[in-house]
Amino acid sequence: MKRYIDGAITKFWIVLLGTTLGLFAVIGVWVGLTSEGLQAPYLNVAFVVSWLISLLLLIPVFWLMKNRPADKVATWGEAMVGSVYVFFLLFWIYGTVPHQWLTFAEAELNWRSDAFLIGFRTPWDSSQGVLEWALPFDITYATLKDLIAVAVYGVGLVANVAVFVMWQKRGDTISAPELESQSRYGRPIVKAADKASAAKVGV
């Protein structure tokens, strides 16, 4: 019997690490193309480190999921320590990480409401950017800053719900699928190895 939690944790890390790399790549490329005076990888150390710390804080949670029996009742002390740890984890994800991003965007990138997002210059009109030409409304860098903050909150919320579901189902098992013994015509199914052994016996 395979445990549900083993495969769920692996899938969770694959999705979360892929999302992390994708988000950092998009931000880094955009900042590198639009901001002057910054060096690669064009990301703030405090923002990146706060994000990585949030990933490290998940490791003890997954360790408990895999090693603690699901039917074991928590003591008062364990419940208090666990609640404080989870509160700190949520505070870090929903408070510290977005704060570091907003501070980086405002203080170092100068993404303010008076800076407009115009895009690359169009080849047919060098006086306008492609977004300025295509959209009937203006987009400021302050709006872009807030949208990325919403994306950070969204990643945290989806991961939050996923971890809650994994914790509730940590004791579930996955049974192996049963092999069909008959074909759709009602005849018994014989494996290739059985056929070969039967042929050798016949010889």
Image (cartoon, rainbow, N blue to C red):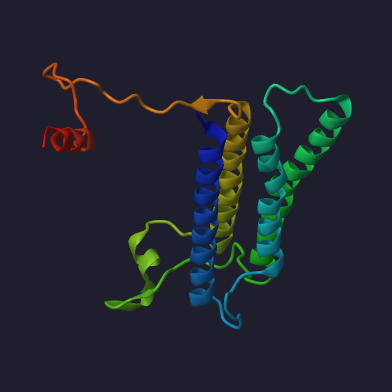
Side of 78 where 131 appears, left or right: left
Q: Is residue 50 above or below residue 110?
A: above
Q: Which image quadrant for residue 157?
A: top right
Where's the C terminus, which quadrant?
Answer: top left
Residue 102, can we see it? no
Side of 90 where 157 appears, left or right: left
Q: Could you say where residue 103 lies in the image, as x and y percent from the top left?
A: 70, 62
Residue at (55% x, 25% y) in the render = 172
Q: Residue furthest bottom?
A: 37
How many labels, in total?
0
Residue at (42% x, 69% y) in the render = 119
Residue at (79% x, 43% y) in the render = 88
Query: Viewer-proximal residue, 16 or 105?
Result: 16
Query: Viewer-proximal residue, 103 or 43?
Result: 43
Residue 179, can we see it? yes
Query: Viewer-proximal residue, 32 or 71?
Result: 71
Q: Residue furthest top?
A: 186
Side of 140 where 200 appears, left or right: left
Side of 169 where 90 appears, left or right: right
Q: Could you say where residue 31 lies in the image, as x and y percent from the top left?
A: 54, 71
Residue at (74% x, 23% y) in the render = 72
Q: Could you say where residue 133 lies in the image, as x and y percent from the top left?
A: 35, 66
Q: Is residue 138 above or below residue 77?
A: below
